[in-house]
Structures are given as structure tokens and as C-alpha cells.
Amino acid sequence: MKSILLGDPEKIRRVFHRPTLDQLEKQAGLDTNRIYTLADLQDCPRDTDFIFSTWGMPALTEEQIKSVFPALKAVFYAAGTVQAFARPFLNCGVRIFSAWAANAVPVAEYTVSQILLANKGFFAACAWQSAGELEHAQIFRSYPGNYNCAVGILGAGMIGKMVIKALKTHDLSVLVFDPFLPDETADQMGVQKTDLQTIFSTCQTVSNHLANNPQTVGMLDYKLFASMPQNTVFLNTGRGAQVVESDLVRVLQERPDLTAVLDVTYPEPPAPGHAFYKLPNCFLTPHMAGSSGLEVGRMSRYMLEEFELFQSGKPTRYEVTKEMLQTMA
């Protein structure tokens, strides 16, 4: 059995921590002393059974895969979306596994923390208090807090489901928009499945986790943002392209009572001079919700565990199929 590391050396070293590499060396025959890149693709062993990679995985053609990796069985990708490289491998019969669930964990943790803060009026109160406007900082008293408060979740994919599960440990009412979520599953999750307009017009905080695909581009527009109740918050850790940003800017200018907390924008970061930088009710973070610091090691650990299941013939958890690519981010 032979396995290799393929991709961006810096990112691979950051994601694959030593204990995980040691285990893969023993169990998967991984050569931990060399990282192959697109530039030296032809040097890759032709008897490679498994590829381990992360952000920076090169996109190969079917011809390259058949020529360079005739014995390849699977790619274990220690990161999230595989859209950029997966199809040619799948077309060649190579199985793909992704650590999207591992990357979803910190995003869900970040999101839940922001929702709980938003419901208490943290962002508005913090801005006023930090500016020395102590009387205005009392605005937090007009926010409902986290008891019997309605929260809207857009998209019930891996991240959305994790967020919902965590929110259900609090006394919150959760509304969900996701056309692909079966009614039976929504009932089992204890959430109310509804439409976008209902969520935006009734929820205290709306959090976006829609899949990033052509169907969702520009889905969140002026009509939705303008319908939000007094002192409500829009949180985006999904993708900026799903928001008509000029519409969001317009509403934030017209409605200083509303707050936007944006971890993603389009483009990212916003262009110099963009209105997002100037609006006092818009809070920007540098796409920090995903895995960072020690958290990235979780992704390679998930792929080690997935490899162990694969080798033992047990059901795997995070395989990606052609059908899944149609709706995945």
C-alpha cells in the first residue's frame, strides 16, 4: 500500500499534524518525507493507492489521473468543498472523501456564539459603549435576549444542522429555510420549516448557511432586508455572493436600527472605500469562522478516521458523490 501527500506544501504542513502523519505512515504507507505538487506530478509513484491533501489540491484532468495514478483508489481531502477538483477523479472511478464536517465545527461554534450575542444587542451596545455614548448603549434593553426568541437559519446543510442542534440546547425558537430539507427531518430536528420572507420578517437574528451555487447568487435582496423587524441582526458566514450587497447597504443606511455581521463578502474583502467600512451598523470579520489555528488539525484527523473506516470495510461518513456535487457548496 502506498500513499502520498499532494498539493500546497505550506498548507499541508499546517493541516497535517505530526501525530496524524505518524498514524498515516503506519496504516496507509504514507511517505511523510515528501510533498508532491502539480509541478512535479510526473514524479509521483504510479502505484499510489491513496492521495491525502488539503486546501491547494491541484485540479487534474482525467487524462492526467489515468496516466499518473493508474492504481489510485481514493482521495482524502482534509478541507471543505471539493468542487474545484472532484469531478475528473470521480469520472475515473476514484472515490473522494472530504473533511467538510470537520471544517463545519468551528463555523457552527462561531455562528452560535454570534447569534447568542446578537440576540442580547451586543453589537449595537458595544459600538455605543466603546464610543463613550453610555446612554445610547442602553439600547441592549430593547433586544429580546435568548429566551423564547426566534432565530432564522438559511440552509440546513452540514453547518446549518450543527448550528440548529446547538441552538436547540437554548430556549430559542428556530425557523429554517431549506427547500431540500424533508418535512419529516424538520420535525425530528424540532424546527419550523418556512419561506425566506417569513424568516426575515419575524426572526430576531437571521444566519445564512445556504450552499454556494448559481441558484443562490443574489437570493438575499432589498425586499427581504427591509422587512426585518426593529433592532434585528443579519449574520453571514456563508458566501457574500448570495447577498445583493448594494441592497444590504441601502437598508443599513435607511435603518440604523438593523445590524449586519459579515464574515464573508463579495468580493472578499470588500473593495477599498466600500460602504461596509463606513456603516456603524455593519461589523466585518476576516473570514475567520472556518478552521484556524489548531482547529485545522481536526480536518486531517477526520480523514485519518475516514481512511480507517474505508480500509476496514465499515461504512464511511464523508464520501462525496457526483450527485452530492449538484447541491454542495
Image: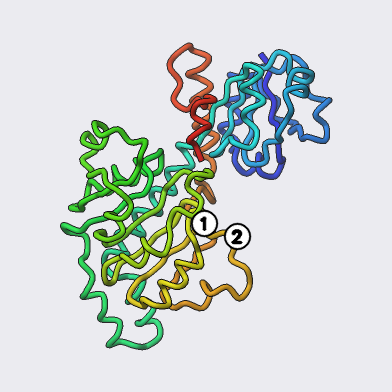
| Quarter-of-image position of residue 45 | top right
Q: Please tell me which of labels 2 and 1 falls first in the chain.
A: 1
**Residue at left 27%, top 33%?**
185
The residue carrying pointer 1 sits among few (fewer than 14), some (14 to 19) or many (20 or more) residues within 10 Å by Cα, namely many
**Residue at left 70%, top 13%?**
71
The spot of residue 137 in percent (x, y) is 30, 81
The number of numbered discs placed on residues in the rendered structure image is: 2
Quadrant housing the N terminus:
top right
Identity, as a three-letter code, of the amino acid under mark 1: Gly
**Label 2, label 1: how far apart the Cα atoms are:** 7 Å
* Side of 114 where 11 appears, left or right: right
- Residue at which label 1 appears: 240
The spot of residue 313 in percent (x, y) is 48, 11
Q: Is residue 176 above or below residue 188?
A: below
- Residue at which label 2 appears: 267
**Residue at left 57%, top 35%?**
78
The spot of residue 194 in percent (x, y) is 27, 46
* Side of 165 where 30 appears, left or right: right
State if disc 1 and disc 2 touch (CB < 8 Å).
Answer: yes
- Classify mark 2: helix, strand or loop: loop
Q: Is residue 288 above or below residue 89?
A: below
The mark found on residue 312 in the picture is none
The spot of residue 172 in percent (x, y) is 20, 53
Q: Is residue 8 above or below residue 22?
A: below
Identity, as a three-letter code, of the amino acid under mark 2: Pro
- Classify mark 1: helix, strand or loop: helix
The residue carrying pointer 2 sits among few (fewer than 14), some (14 to 19) or many (20 or more) residues within 10 Å by Cα, namely few
